[in-house]
Amino acid sequence: MIIGNFSVTDFNQLPSLGSGMGFRLPLAKQILAAQESLDFLEITADHFMEMSRQREKLLDQLKSQYTLIPHGLSLSLGSAEGLNSVYLRQLTDLVERVNPPWWSEHISFSKAGGVEIGHLSPVPFNGSGLKALCENIRIATESIARPLILENITYTMALPWNEIDEAEFLSELLDRTGSGLLLDVTNLYTNSENHKYDAVAFLDHLPADRVVQLHYVGGEQREGKIIDNHSHATPEPVWALLGEVFKRFPIKGAILERDANFPEFDTLLSEVERCRATAQKAGRWT
Amino acid sequence: MDLIQSQQLLARLFTDAAFREQLIENPTSVSKRYQMDSADVRWLQQFAGDEGKRFAWTLIRKRLGVVASLLPQTQRVMGKRFGKSFHEFAADRDTHGINRHLTDAVDFARWLMDRQLAEMPNWLPMLIRYELTWLEAQNAQGFFFKMIPYRHDMDALVKASNAEQITYQGRPNLIIWWRWSARSEPHERVIFPRYWPG
């Protein structure tokens, strides 16, 4: 279905993938051997661009064993200067090669004025931010003919140019662009603690039919703030919030997003299994 | 201030220590250049203070973690000096591209080699060059070939640097690095003289 300039997906028709993890090179061997414990994988798109033959072989091997969801880092969909067109070409090629049921990127910008920030930075929750995102998403989705889901990020300080709250902004963005939501539950928890708002109330403002996939992982406390460094076990408050999310939304997949400080692989698999059990308790993926 | 300007301002704030200092010390010049109103100036000054420094520190820490894994022996030998040096290097430098972390490590290693590092082993520049050349081979966008004679057995030196006592290893050799194309893997080969006394 086309609305305005965007093709709108019926996200209910997307396949249920289940519980998986982000593919990480140091864990490649264990991940390739864990097909019985992992339902699908998310791959960081940047790691599978400008590939050597060996990396191509690895991608083909992963693709033969798992459904892969490409997760972009550098498209900079929130850039008022326009998105990263070189990266878009590379991302298009990767998505074509992998043929996923959806792909994902962030509601953020990561470059401006010739500077690459090296981090996902917030877009103001106002008309200008919405306009920049909508235009860049239009260009991206014309190039990549698969459903797009957009991830919420953490922010250190609320921008002074915000005119509405994040939940309202996300809803408006998803409605205008026809995109789905990759709800990062850890990011939601982190922002709610650091900026003092109710994360569960936030969920009540999201469009129920657009929350497609989840991220979760643990961060650390530093100087009274939570830092989302993806390098610790998922904390209990995030598990509780995951439970609330599964009750409310027909989630198609959830990814453990551990990036560093890896424990024994079985410990990671136990988190993946706990996520699966949490979803099944809420009547999902049964 | 429109969105383009505000994003350019934020990008500089997040990555440029000198710019943050300027915003604190001389906000008028910055506000004129970016056409900021007084509320914007107050927020940005607040951000440029402790919060901004913390955020910038987090960004640099993220880069440092990856660079340390790409220069492991240099990091091992330098200890805390490695992190301090990287913070100095990265304070007003951002990185670019898909292989930004590799580029970061290459640029940092070159920066280190240009420095006089006090209280460090005199063979440290050789070790840095050894690790740097391997990274250059990995970062090469096409054919790559380098041949460097070393006065010391780098492999033994690297292994010895893992021990409690870091000792000096002297056995000359020739190290060759090559890569046929961007799609092939890089290689390294060490050639020792057939006969060497001692």
Image (tube, rainbow, N blue to C red):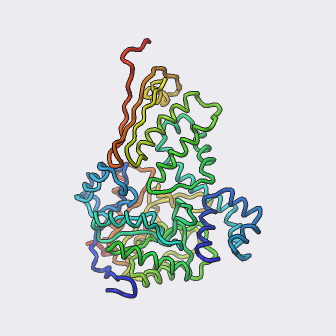
Snapshot quadrant of residue A234: bottom left
Asked if residue B149 lies left or right of residue B38, the reply is left
Asked if residue B105 lies left or right of residue A21, the reply is right
Tell me the residue at 37%/38% (across/down): B178
Query: Does any portion of residue A257 appear in the rendered image?
Result: yes
Q: Nearer the viewer, residue A250 or B150?
A: B150
What is the number of callouts on the image?
0
A150 is higher (above) or lower (below) than A3: above
A259 is higher (above) or lower (below) than A99: above
Query: Does any portion of residue A201 appear in the rendered image?
Result: no
Residue B111, x across and y down, in percent = 58, 42
| Residue projecting furthest to the bottom | A3
Position of the C terminus of chain A by quadrant: bottom left
| Residue projecting furthest to the left | A64
Asked if residue B154 lies left or right of residue A255, the reply is right
Tell me the residue at 36%/73% (across/down): A143
Asked if residue B31 lies left or right of residue B92, the reply is right
Snapshot quadrant of residue A70: bottom left
